[in-house]
Image (cartoon, rainbow, N blue to C red):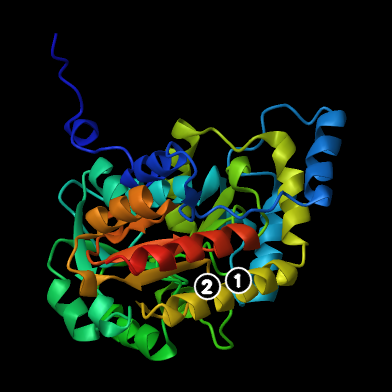
Amino acid sequence: MEWNMNDAVRDVELSEIREFAFLVEDTPGACALTIGEPDLNTPEHIKDAAKAALDRNDTHYPPGNGYRYLLEEISRFESEHHGLSYDPEEIIVTMGATEGLFLSLMTVLNPGDEVIVPTPAFGMYESMIRLCRGVPVFLPTEDNCFQIDPEQLKQTITPRTKAVILTSPNNPTGCIYTGETLDAIHAVLRDLPVFILCDDVYRELIYAEDYHSFAEYTDLRDRIIVLQSFSKPYAMTGWRLGYCMSAAPVRDRMQVIHQNAIVGAPSFVQPACVAALRTDTSPVTELFRRRKEYVYRRLTAMGLNVREPEGAFYMFVDIRRYGMDSRTFCTRMLKEGLVGVIPGIYFGTEGFFRLSYCYSDEDLRLGLDRMETFLKTL
């Protein structure tokens, strides 16, 4: 029997990034440098906060958007650390930044609305836009040092443009948008009825001295939605926790989707979120900075073209000189060299691969040694 299902669901495939990562895991003896998950455990004091909540039977229904104490802590944290002013009534605690992104798109999109996605980009942007009946419009940046060209942005905008997604630091490149780029984007979008989704989940992992988020443009505050996650800086990927911030009228509608899809984040994990926000993440940043410098030095010594990341824990490596598409290159390197990375086409940009350096020092050394040996065979 052929079921008459939702066309949006029928036409969207599962993550190719995950599929390739599983292929690497299933390859005997392979060294994986694939997934963006820190090789760290959640700090003990964060786990202790959740354990204490369980011991005091904090296992009942929470308020839909999060406990007041956590919303106030997020508001304080964002004000003190990032200079962003959002009241507790403008915040929703989400099941990861992924839910926040889905809430945002489902809230603002009507069928056929277009969302501009600068590429390379996190692969789930496209699938989520399509699930929300929107149309992804891709804006290539690989030939502009992964910065958005304002003239190209103007040419991409149409009467159907409803939103733009900005990710800085970027997954998969690790690059951040310069002040010049942000000012240019602001100048283009300032007078347009377009929402800006600021995916800032890597903001706590910054190596550059001068970093700014588009969320700092307060004149566009009514159209900006900020997405955040506890996963990366606090090694809480499995906790599935994040939050989104937006002007009250937008948050008011976003909570409708949140309530009907999730109801609310689990009660006993919310004290752990407070403990996380009070945690100094600088040692984690320094760990990844050291690994970044090692990997960058090794890759450039191999003659590979790669921009040095300014945040997150990824490198997007140019392999166009080898005359292979990225799937072929990465599959060959996996089978012949026993090292796994992710094909760039899965991020919307051919001729590159993404390497994640949130693995142990030993894994990085082994993987890069194997990569160097493989490249000599080409």
Residue 287 shows in this picture = yes
> Residue 32 in the image: x percent, y percent?
49, 51
> Residue 255 in the image: x percent, y percent?
48, 44
User: Which residue corresponds to the image point at 28% horizontal and 70% vertical from the top-left?
Assistant: 319
Classed neighbour count for the residue bearing mark 1: other residues with Cα under 10 Å, few (<14), some (14–19), many (≥20): some
User: Which residue corresponds to the image point at 23% horizontal and 54% vertical from the top-left?
Assistant: 328
User: Which residue corresponds to the image point at 34% horizontal and 42% vertical from the top-left?
Assistant: 15
Q: Which of the 4 quarters of the picture holds residue 279?
A: bottom right
> Residue 176 in the image: x percent, y percent?
45, 78
Pick whichever, 314 or 134, lies toward us: 314
Secondary element under disc 2, as helix, strand or loop, is helix
Q: Residue furthest front?
A: 377
118 sits to left or right of 78: left
Classed neighbour count for the residue bearing mark 2: other residues with Cα under 10 Å, few (<14), some (14–19), many (≥20): many
Q: Residue furthest bottom?
A: 180
User: Which residue corresponds to the image point at 35% horizontal and 44% vertical from the top-left?
Assistant: 20
User: What residue is shown with label 2?
Assistant: 295
User: What residue is shown with label 1?
Assistant: 291
Q: Which mark is residue 162?
A: none
Q: CA distance from mark 1 to mark 2?
A: 6 Å
133 sits to left or right of 166: left
Q: Amino acid at mark 2?
A: Val
Q: Amino acid at mark 1?
A: Arg
Is there a contact, CB below 8 Å, between mark 1 and mark 2? Answer: yes
> Residue 374 in the image: x percent, y percent?
37, 62
For residue 112, above or below residue 285: above
Q: Residue furthest top?
A: 1
